[in-house]
């Protein structure tokens, strides 16, 4: 197979949802279709249930599971699918945001009873930042949910994206009979007890065929024809380009646990979802079809085995072919490295690979050289954009509890931050260290891991802090003046970028008014 064909056959995507909407279940069904697993129940949910918030075993288990299911590669109808897992728990949202920078498209699962939930809205905003194409799968149609038309309206208004149904449910709840594929114009009947993959696709060439009444009954046949008429007249024809541009989200209905509507989703997905596309670096746009290798690290897993301080860096290949025997340039350090035991993730197994292509995710064993956001190339000094840090929500100061273990604490904090567990800001004054996170859970994770992996103990003192604002100014002198006058509130992030720590919204506003030449940003990446 040619290099071009390898790229064109790849679909790298992530499934996102509010917890409990059915992400794990859908993942499992897709793997079953891909033949990557043989039985249901093989994919463990990596979610942390609320009641387990302070259960450290649960956190550790979650880390173990999420390495195994971080990336699931499989083939379906000659298409190489790379499915990237995203944590559903909101405290790990930052991890999900970073994973979304490594995908080319997204499938969003929505519970038909609950409709669009909070986490779904947040994730959609992240997709919009990069115009990532989104397909919606409205799940649990075997339950009495909201009216499908209302659900479509809700998706449009709450997620702020136009929708286009590509399948349509025949009833729901107890009388759910199946979904009609508006894309392929065929009908799949629902048999709730079937847990196996079923091939009972009844091809209905013409929806007006009287045979339809015999299959689903007169009332439902009439209703379906009416619905299809209405959809075709209300919604304009599905335009694949609008989907690829992130302007329209095709919508599928189904029931993941019953395996319904999943095949329609997958069959359409492999036809319309994007193969790897060009990506922006700080110097230029790089096409996946370029022969020279480039890629970036979007996730790091460390210390899975406490005896060996090994880490796995997850690298998304953006262009060229990765070869195991070649040395590549680590742009930030300007050094060359060889990764002779790079692994691919096929289903739940890791296996050593000789080569990999754009769109693929590979695991690189690392002893501490790679950080999230690092770019590897075949020599070029370009760095991929698109892994911004967002201002955290919760801020706490680190207090060392054991002066004898200061070094261990420093090392542990540095490594955990490199892994992206949280963000650390070091004040210019007095080197105070402040950890910022999205949720409360991370503080427990940090304390636990510092103790067990580094032998260090620390306390966290909550701070009243509104936002961490990355600052910039065209005039270096003015920036220096600002830093001087607000010295006590200036810190550095992990990359040494200057951050203004704003305690309240009102105060930030006042400072902004007083220093109109200074730009304040809530994310670390700005133009
Ligand atoms: P998540 O990863 O998005 O958090 O959701 P997950 O797949 O774990 O699904 C959440 C719950 O919803 C599970 O039930 C799952 O079985 C159920 N579910 C998934 N798809 C459907 C569907 O199409 N219809 C119905 N009725 N339920 C569905 P659970 O009780 O939390 O776990 P389990 O014991 O069933 O595994």
Image (cartoon, rainbow, N blue to C red):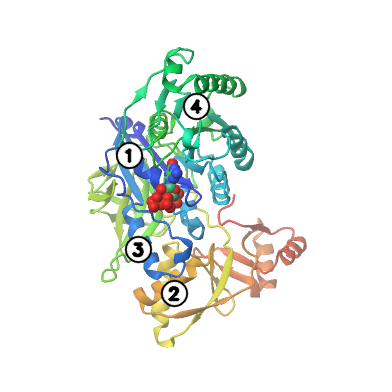
Q: Name the residue rendered at 72%, 58% in the picture.
A: 517
Q: Kindly indicate whether the residue at mark 4 contacts the one at mark 2 (C-beta within 8 angstroms).
A: no
Residue, disc 1: 195
What residue sits right under mark 2 in the picture?
447
Q: Alpha carbon of mark 1 to alpha carbon of mark 2: how far?
A: 42 Å
Q: Identify the secondary structure beneath mark 1.
A: loop
Q: Nearer the viewer, mark 4 or mark 1?
A: 1
Quadrant where the N terminus sits is: top left
Residue appearing at x 52%, y 54% in the figure? 388
Q: Which residue is mark 4?
A: 240
Q: x and y percent of residue 168 in the render?
A: 50, 28
Mark 4 surroundings: few (<14), some (14-19) or many (≥20) residues within 10 A? some
- Is the residue marked by circle 1 packed among few (<14), some (14-19), or many (20+) residues within 10 Å? some
Residue designated by label 3: 61
Mark 4 or mark 3: whose residue is earlier in sequence: 3
Judged from the image, the secondary structure of the residue bearing numbered disc 3 is helix
C-alpha gap between disc 3 and disc 1: 27 Å
Q: CA distance from mark 4 to mark 1?
A: 32 Å
Mark 2 to mark 4 CA distance (whole Å): 48 Å
């Amino acid at each position: 197979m040619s290099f071009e064909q390898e790229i064109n056959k790849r679909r790298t995507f992530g499934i996102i949802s509010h917890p409990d909407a059915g992400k794990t279940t859908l993942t499992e069904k897709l793997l079953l279709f891909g033949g990557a697993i043989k039985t249901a129940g093989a994919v463990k949910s990596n979610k942390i249930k609320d009641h387990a918030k302070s259960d450290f075993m649960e956190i550790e288990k979650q880390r173990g599971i999420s390495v195994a299911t971080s990336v699931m590669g499989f083939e379906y109808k000659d298409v190489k699918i790379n499915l990237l897992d995203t944590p559903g728990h909101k405290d790990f949202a930052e991890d999900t945001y970073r994973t979304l920078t490594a995908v080319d498209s997204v499938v969003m699962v929505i519970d038909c009873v609950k409709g669009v939930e909070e986490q779904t809205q947040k994730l959609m905003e992240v997709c919009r930042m990069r115009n990532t194409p989104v397909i919606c799968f409205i799940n649990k149609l075997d339950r009495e949910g909201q009216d499908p038309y209302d659900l479509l309206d809700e998706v449009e208004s709450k997620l702020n994206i136009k929708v286009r149904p590509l399948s349509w449910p025949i009833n729901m709840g107890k009388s759910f009979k199946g979904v009609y594929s508006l894309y392929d114009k065929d009908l799949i009947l629902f048999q709730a007890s079937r847990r196996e993959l079923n091939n009972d696709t009844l091809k209905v060439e013409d929806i007006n065929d009287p045979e339809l009444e015999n299959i689903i009954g007169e009332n439902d046949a009439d209703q379906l024809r009416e619905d299809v008429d209405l959809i075709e007249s209300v919604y304009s024809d599905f335009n694949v380009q609008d989907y690829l541009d992130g302007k329209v989200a095709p919508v599928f209905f189904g029931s993941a646990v019953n395996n319904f509507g999943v095949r329609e989703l997958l069959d359409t997905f492999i036809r319309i979802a994007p193969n790897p596309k060009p990506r922006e670096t700080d110097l230029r746009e790089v096409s996946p079809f370029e022969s020279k290798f480039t890629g970036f690290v979007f996730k790091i897993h460390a210390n899975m085995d406490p005896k060996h301080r090994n880490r796995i860096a997850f690298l998304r290949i953006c262009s060229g072919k990765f070869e195991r025997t070649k040395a590549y340039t680590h742009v930030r350090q300007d050094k060359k490295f060889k990764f002779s035991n790079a692994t691919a993730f096929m289903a739940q197994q890791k296996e050593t690979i000789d080569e990999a292509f754009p769109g693929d995710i590979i695991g690189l064993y690392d002893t501490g050289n790679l950080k999230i956001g690092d770019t590897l190339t075949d020599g070029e000094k370009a760095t991929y954009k698109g892994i911004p840090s967002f201002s955290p929500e919760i801020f706490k100061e680190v207090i060392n509890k054991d002066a004898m273990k200061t070094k261990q604490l420093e090392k542990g904090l540095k490594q955990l931050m490199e892994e992206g567990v949280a963000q650390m800001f070091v004040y210019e004054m007095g080197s105070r260290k402040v950890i910022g996170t999205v949720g409360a859970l991370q503080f427990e994770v940090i304390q636990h891991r510092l103790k067990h992996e580094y032998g260090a103990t620390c306390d966290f003192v909550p701070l009243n802090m509104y936002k961490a604002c990355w600052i910039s100014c065209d005039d270096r002198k003015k920036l220096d003046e600002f830093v001087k006058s607000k010295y006590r509130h200036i810190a550095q992030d992990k990359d040494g970028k200057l951050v203004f720590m704003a305690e309240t919204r009102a105060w930030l506003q006042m400072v902004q008014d007083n220093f109109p030449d200074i730009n304040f940003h809530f994310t670390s990446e700005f133009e």
